[in-house]
Image (cartoon, rainbow, N blue to C red):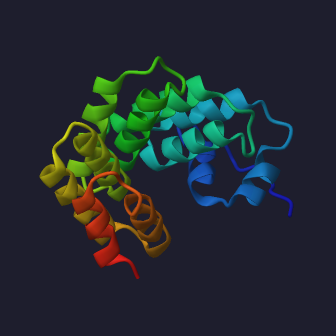
Amino acid sequence: MTIHPLPTAAGRPWRAELLSQLDPRELSAAMDGEDPSQWLHAVMASGMPAAQIRLGRLLLSGECLPTDRRAAFACFLSAAATGDPEAQNLLGRCHDNGWGTRPDREAAKRSYKAAADGGDYGGAHNHGCVLAAEGCGAGALHWFEKAVKDAPPPARDAILMTLRHHPRCAIRAFAQRNAA
């Protein structure tokens, strides 16, 4: 598939628009031969959280672009600043795992809580995991219930599979009751 260059009207974030709409194969063709930093700068300047999240994920995975965890962290940080719950969860993952930043459990906890409060099922699951690790089983169950209710089927199944092996009996029982 050939993607022809789009017009570059002043101020139009066409790279960000492409990034948020194309599948990986099409995106690879569109980016062919271009300096990836052009895409990073365009997406960061666009103020489009969906494009920032997508670029951050690509930078973490190394799909279409060289892996760059620091740039991925910057993308998630920028998108999270807009209040986007998915970005807040991904920012929490970066803080938790030290992706592009130093590990910071407290920052991860704040990001997971903000994502959960914003309705992100991944944030609800991760916030529940934090609460369970801190010994707050009832609070953890509340967020696990929300995550399972809001997650699409493949993610729901993955969450329940993980919870089936949880050390807390009440959490394992919850997973057993909700298994498909």
Does 123 sit left or right of 39 as displayed? left
Q: Is residue 87 visible?
A: yes
Residue 82, quarter of the rendered image: top left
Residue 175's x, y, as percent? Answer: 33, 68
Residue 126's x, y, as percent? Answer: 34, 47
Residue at the (28%, 25%) spot, across then down: 106
Q: Quarter holding the C terminus?
A: bottom left
Residue at the (22%, 36%) spot, across then down: 134
Residue situated in front as seen by the camera: 52 or 144: 144
Does 69 sit left or right of 30 as displayed? left
Residue 14's x, y, as percent? Answer: 61, 46
Residue 8's x, y, as percent? Answer: 66, 42
Residue 161, quarter of the rendered image: bottom left
Residue at the (17%, 58%) spot, across then down: 142
Residue at the (86%, 38%) spot, across then down: 33
Does 133 sit left or right of 42 as displayed? left
Q: Is residue 41 visible?
A: no
Return the residue found at the far bottom: 180
Return the residue found at the far left: 138
Residue situated in front as seen by the camera: 8 or 31: 31
Residue 162, quarter of the rendered image: bottom left
In this rendering, the answer to whether 26 lies above or below 179 is above
| Labels in figure, total | 0
Residue situated in front as seen by the camera: 53 or 126: 126
